[in-house]
Amino acid sequence: MEHVLLISLAMIFIIQVLFFIFASAFKTDKVTDLAYGLTFVIISWILLIYNKIFTLPNIILALMITFWGFRLAGYLFYRILKTKKDERFNGIRESFWKFAMFWTFQTILIFIIMLPIIFSMNMSGIDTVNTISIISIMGFCIWAIGFITESIADSQKFSFRNNIKNKNKWIDTGLWKYSRHPNYFGEILCWIGIFVFVNPVFHSWSFVSALSPIGIIISLLFFSGIPLLEKKDYEKYGKIKEYQRYKRTTSVLIPWFKR
């Protein structure tokens, strides 16, 4: 298994390096999120085909990753084509080493999040589960709820941002009325669902795949997700009383009723 983990990390690294070379050469943000989503899809199918463990759970898992990865990569790529640049990288894309550090972080994060997939698609023999258990069904349902939530939230925000009437306004309608970051809530559910879905094939030290949902939660709550957006929104709207009220009464992550 150690050998498989190293090979998987190497493949992820190679894909990210290729995208980084392009992004760094042209000082562009356009392929950053594209590389993130597509890497999951590419590695998942490589592992499935290479290991030839075509169990029903593994095939469904590959399809789950494909739907999630293509939707996220496609949406973010289309969005960056409209906005031209990602403000997260202001002051970073211009510096080779700072930009390289971000891509290194992204490589490590992808590897950690992919751990359940790597383990599941390398279980063979008596370890292989070829039927869908109740636990797997529960995991799939969690993933589906997360996928739908994230898709709706992204669609609502994209439509809101592209309406000229909403210029210099923050979104507080739809799912965003009940959460300041419902898309991230959906993303977290997706990976919790995937971890639960593949859980029946796990035993011994493969429990380390729990780092997958933990990793995405830590990343979104403390690093690349919520903190950056909260800071940007506060800089834009922090002095507006209506925004202060929205922030004070609306759940940060989990959709819930107004306080």
Image (spheres, rainbow, N blue to C red):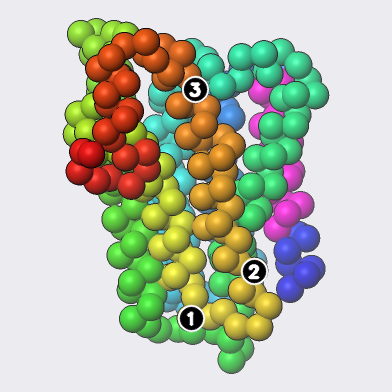
Numbered range of the magenta stretch: 8-24
Q: Residues within 10 Å of mark 2 (few under 14, many from 20)?
A: few
Dividing the picture into quarters, in which one does residue 13 lie? top right
Q: Nearer the viewer, mark 2 or mark 1?
A: 2
- Residue 100 location (% of width, % of height): 75, 29
Q: Which residue in the structure is indicated by mark 2? A: 208
Give the residue at x 23% y 39%: 259
Q: Residue at x 61, y 20 (%)?
A: 89
Mark 2–mark 3 distance (CA, rounded to whole Å)? 33 Å
Q: Position of residue 19 (x, y in %)?
A: 66, 32
Is residue 258 in sight in this rendering? yes
- Circles 2 and 3 in contact, beta carbons < 8 Å: no
For the residue pair 62 and 80, the one nearer the viewer reads as: 80
Q: Position of residue 135 (x, y in %)?
A: 38, 78
Nearer mark to the viewer, of 3 and 1:
3
The amino acid type, in three-letter code, at marker 1 is Pro
Query: Observer-nearest residue: 7 or 150?
Result: 150
The answer to whether residue 14 is left or right of residue 137 is: right
Q: Quadrant of residue 174?
A: top left
Q: In terms of sequence position, does the residue under pointer 2 or pointer 3 come before the other?
A: 2
Residue that mark 1 sits on: 200
Point out the tag, 2 or 1, that comes first from the N-terminus: 1
Mark 3, residue position? 231
- Amino acid type of the residue tagged 3 in the rendering: Lys
In 3D space, how far apart are the residues under numbered discs 2 and 1 (Cα atoms)?
14 Å
